[in-house]
Amino acid sequence: MDSILLVNPPSEFLLDQKVFPPLGVLTVAAELRRLGVEVEVLDLAGREDYLGALARWLGSHHYPKGDFGITANTPQMPYVYRILQMIRDYRPGAKVIIGGPHASFAPQHCLKLGFSQVVMDDGVDGIRQVVAGKEDKLIKGGLISLDEYPMPARDLIDFDSYKYILPGTYALATNVMWSQGCPYRCSFCSGRELLFYRKYRTRSPEHILAELDHLRDTYGIRAFQAYDDEVNIHRDHFDALCTALAEGGWTWRAFIKSNLFTEDQAKLAARSGAAQF
């Protein structure tokens, strides 16, 4: 693989598609860069004529023999299928890979739609396997340490077009991920049956703070939404992270598991800049 276009499909079911940048595909893009692959991201979020935008790219781009990667959650699949069909029309022999939540939950469905390869579970490790030449139709990414993840390549999209004001404040904010997975098996959660989504993994405070410093220094952002399922599953990690955040003057909000949340944690989080849970 010498070059690849990663496509972030539209999400027309959302009230506003330009709130949070697509961290998953941007992290995979950063890993491809690290592996020496030429990568671009076509961000179709919020574009009414998303197929027209794709057609213009396909009709004018300078490396017509590159591969394609598409990320998708399940509600995005109708748009993803149209994107796949257009790519096949313009580049019949191209490799088209799909990853993201739908690929992990329904890999056989993705193969039936005509994708060349399906990357399940951890996309960073999965794309490493693809770049290394693995030709299997189904690629299962391993559960690697989140500290191995590169910083999302936010420069590959129009980052400034995404606008999020932290509730209860006037602070321009963006999304970050502290952890992935949830060990609980709530009946309403589709992830409860997949080990990948039940395995709880955290980033070290140092790894997280390096990304926050980059957001401040590059984009002037000092507020964020932690986009994890629940940030307080591992108490020691949460406490250590709040202690580290307290020194940086950040403002933030997050989702918590209420039955694990204590008064001491509330006080520590408040001192670290938490504005809302």
Image: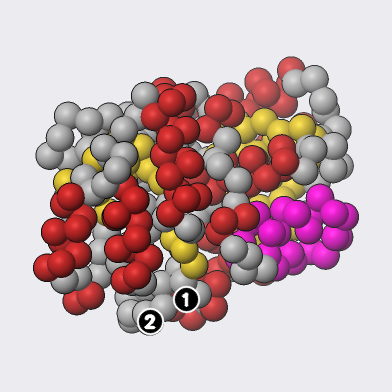
For residue 3, side relative to residue 200 (left or right): right
Q: What is the crowding at mark 2: few (fewer than 14 residues within 10 Å), some, or many (at least 20)?
A: some
> What range is drawn magenta here?
121-141
Any magenta on residue 42?
Answer: no
Say left or right for 48 vs 165.
Answer: right
The x and y percentages for residue 230 are 32, 64
In what quadrant of the picture does the C terminus appear?
Answer: bottom left
| Quarter-of-image position of residue 147 | bottom right
Dots 2 and 1: beta carbons under 8 Å? yes
Seen from the viewer's position, the closer of residues 228 and 213 is 213
> Mark on residue 198?
1
265 in relation to 79, above or below? below
Tell me which corner region of the image, top left, top right, bottom left or bottom right, holds residue 46.
Answer: top left
Instruction: Answer with left or right where residue 44 lies relative to residue 108.
Output: left
- Tell me which label, 2 or 1, sits earlier in the chain: 2
Q: Which residue is tagged 2?
A: 185
Amino acid type assigned to the residue bearing label 1 in the image: Arg
Q: In what quadrant of the picture does the N terminus appear?
A: top right
**Would you say residue 175 is visible in this rendering?**
yes
Frontmost residue, 145 versus 65: 145
Neighbour class for label 1 at 10 Å: few (<14), some, many (≥20)?
some
Look at the numbered disc 1 and give the secondary structure of its residue. helix
Looking at the rendered structure, the kind of residue marked 2 is: Arg
Residue 228 at x, y percent in the picture: 37, 58
